Amino acid sequence: MIGAAALVAALAAALTLPLTAGAALPQQAAPQPETTYRVSGADTPEQRTALAARDIDILAAGPDRLEIRTTRAEADQLRAEGLGLTPLADPASLGPVVPRPDKVAEFPAGYTGYTNYAELNTRLAALRASNPSIVSVSNYGRSFLGRTLPLVKISDNVGTDEDEPEVLFTCAQHAREHLTVEMCLRIAERLVANYASSTGSTVNSREIWLMPMLNPDGAEFDIASNRFAFWRKNRQPTAGTSAVGTDPNRNWGYQWGCCGGSSGSPSSDTYRGKSAFSAPETARVFDWVGSRVVGGRQQITSHIDWHTYSELILWPYGYTSADTAPGLDADAAATFQALGRAMAQTNGYTAEQASDLYVTDGGIDDWMWATHGIWSYTFEMYPVSQSQGGFYPRDSVIARETARNDAAVDLFLGYADCPPRITGRTC
């Protein structure tokens, strides 16, 4: 194993109109085929940050694991620099994007239990139709390709803006993370199903919002060929280049592009965009979250952004490795840690500050907290490795792995009125 300083030095040196079903999507050809590798020898946040700074796609990371996707030439270079790389098999349904202009995007065999964009809207409409007193379904804008961005509200007086703590769940910022859509659906459908029989249900004392598919263009593109494209970003072309896509979770306005935690290269999977909120999808969330400031006070108290994979619970800041920083004092850090670890005890995930993995800038959690004072977490869901399916676990795990987070969601909702209560403090 090489030392952190040596590895960092080595790596640094190396350094609209609505879419119709038949519309052709712009393509972006990879210059070389890529393979997924399990990496050994990059065990510190600094080492992993240096890898990410080379525009290597980090798929999963944790205290004792790291998986990346890169070209054979880059893998050979990393081995020459002292890292160990073991190839991992790709999912059977991974393949090139082949346009099917007359077909609706559908999941391949073995994955049809997942929910595509059309099915999502159907399920949400059915949920509202059968529970109109506690469920509303609307949208908060449109994606780059013109798809409406669905918004769900669940509350006992759903048509009234009550003076109650508001909780937001966002899913599918990253296109290939389809299990997160199922997580948002699980939250909504379980809250509704349990409402009638639950005494003192949080539905009575909270206003709960869900954005179940923040990046529908990317999610649909990922399955457009009835195979998986391994697509992460949105589908917004970058002017003057052949590249397509901005990484929504590097496009948020707080410390955007500040700290080597995103890429300025349009071809990169972590391309941060030409400016903060240049992606329509993040810009519309910006607008909507701003609209929840009433009488000078932000109504949203708490937020979880769902991702896959690694089985982690992360909290701000991601842009700095310091536990405290401007806007995040020791008391706030203690609350983030205590609530994050309490939730991790319910689902077996690893809880840590986001930058303990590697530095990222322009992330949603940092923006939610620093700009609006919203207690914001990222959950990285099942699995821990591509050997278990990676971004594409079989649909047979959906029920188990979404239910695995029920207790964490309930705990989170319970503390939404005052997260510092978990440390014994008052609000």
Image (spheres, rainbow, N blue to C red):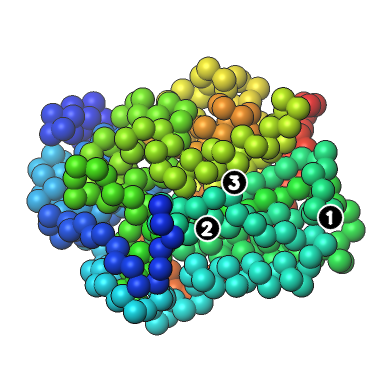
- Name the residue beneath numbered marker 1: 156
Label 3 to label 2, Cα distance in Å? 21 Å
The answer to whether any part of residue 174 appears in the image is no
Residue linked to disc 2: 148
CB atoms of marks 3 and 2 within 8 Å? no
The amino acid type, in three-letter code, at marker 3 is Ile
> Quadrant of residue 347 in the image?
bottom right
Side (left or right) of 167 relative to 333: right
At 70% from the left and 69% from the top, the residue drawn is 127
Residue count near mark 1 (Cα–Cα under 10 Å), binned few <14, some 14–19, many ≥20 = some
Q: Is residue 33 left or right of residue 227?
A: left
Identify the mark nearer the N-term, 1 or 3.
Answer: 1
Q: Position of residue 236 (x, y in %)?
A: 33, 50
Q: Secondary structure at mark 1?
A: loop
- Residue occupied by mark 3: 304
Q: Please name the residue shown 72% across and 36% down the image.
A: 299
| Residue 330 showing in the rendered view | yes
Examine the rendered structure and indicate whether residue 382 appears above or below residue 328: below
Q: CA distance from mark 2 to mark 1?
A: 25 Å
Q: Is residue 364 above or below residue 84?
A: above
The single residue placed furthest to the right in the displayed view is 199
How busy is the neighbourhood of tag 3: few (under 14 within 10 Å), some, or many (20 plus)? many
Q: Position of residue 382 (x, y in %)?
A: 48, 60
Quarter holding the C terminus is: top right
The local secondary structure at tag 2 comes to strand
Residues packed near mark 2 inside 10 Å, few (<14), some (14 to 19) or many (20 plus): many
